């Protein structure tokens, strides 16, 4: 399972909400199953897919799962920043190996062919392919928190550790982890 926190643009009024999407576009290319979790995507064969998920900026997210050893080519949007998070197995791409639990981050101009990227992996490998237009505002990340200034992250840590209702309640027997303090020297 991968949980993604998406930085939102600050030039829009965005209401808090939760939406469930039981059906997402799913297809297979070269024995690789793909599920479009957010955004729009046009495959190398020209097939166009659109996820029903709500977005506040132009982005794409695809769950990519190898049913057999092989390779798949993913198309890139001009001007996007990308990340490939390996959740199971490892991938080889652009002369680099990316192991499980690692993130391969790149801009479309960082790859040899800035229109697509080829990923090679063994059966059972799973990655999350994510990308989007860079935001016009500063984005700070710490633990599970995303904000555009240090004070908001500090408040989020306090609210999380005090069980503030803004984070909701998850019905689970698992212990809720406390948020760690910001490291000394954290810039923001």
Image (cartoon, grey):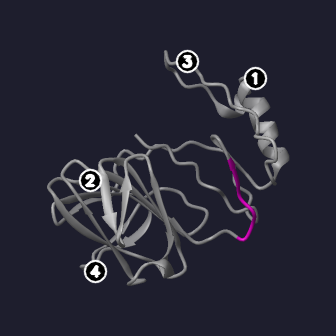
- Point out the tag, 2 or 4, that comes first from the N-terminus: 4
Q: Position of residue 30 (x, y in %)?
A: 16, 66
Image location of residue 129, percent across then percent down: 41, 60
Q: Is residue 115 left or right of residue 79?
A: left
Report the quarter where the N terminus lies.
Answer: top left
Measuring 64% from the left and 56% from the top, which residue is drawn there? Answer: 7
Q: Examine the image and state in which quarter residue 132 appears.
A: bottom right
Could you tell me residue 37's position as x and y percent?
Answer: 41, 55
Residue at left offset 81%, top offset 45%:
152
Q: Nearer the viewer, residue 119 or 171?
A: 119
Decide whether residue 129 is among the magenta residues. no
Pointer 3 residue: 175
- Which range of residues does the magenta coloring cover? 136-141
Q: How many marks?
A: 4
Q: Residue at x 76, y 65 (%)?
A: 11
The residue that disc 2 covers is 65
């Amino acid at each position: 399972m991968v949980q993604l926190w998406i930085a939102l643009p600050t030039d829009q009024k965005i209401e808090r909400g939760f939406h469930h999407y039981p059906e997402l576009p799913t297809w297979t290319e070269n024995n690789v199953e793909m599920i479009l979790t957010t955004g729009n995507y046009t495959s190398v064969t020209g097939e166009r897919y659109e996820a029903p998920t709500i977005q506040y900026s132009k982005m794409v997210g695809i769950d990519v799962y190898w049913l057999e050893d092989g390779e798949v080519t993913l198309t890139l949007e001009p001007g996007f920043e990308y990340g490939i998070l390996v959740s199971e197995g490892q991938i080889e791409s652009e002369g680099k190996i990316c192991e499980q639990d690692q993130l391969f981050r790149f801009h479309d101009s960082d790859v040899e062919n800035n229109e697509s990227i080829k990923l090679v992996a063994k059966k059972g490998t799973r990655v999350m392919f994510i990308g989007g237009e860079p935001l016009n505002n500063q984005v700070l990340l710490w633990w599970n928190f995303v904000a555009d200034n240090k004070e908001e992250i500090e408040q989020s840590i306090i609210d999380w550790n005090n069980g503030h209702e803004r984070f909701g309640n998850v019905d689970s027997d698992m212990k809720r982890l406390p948020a760690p303090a910001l490291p000394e020297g954290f810039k923001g």
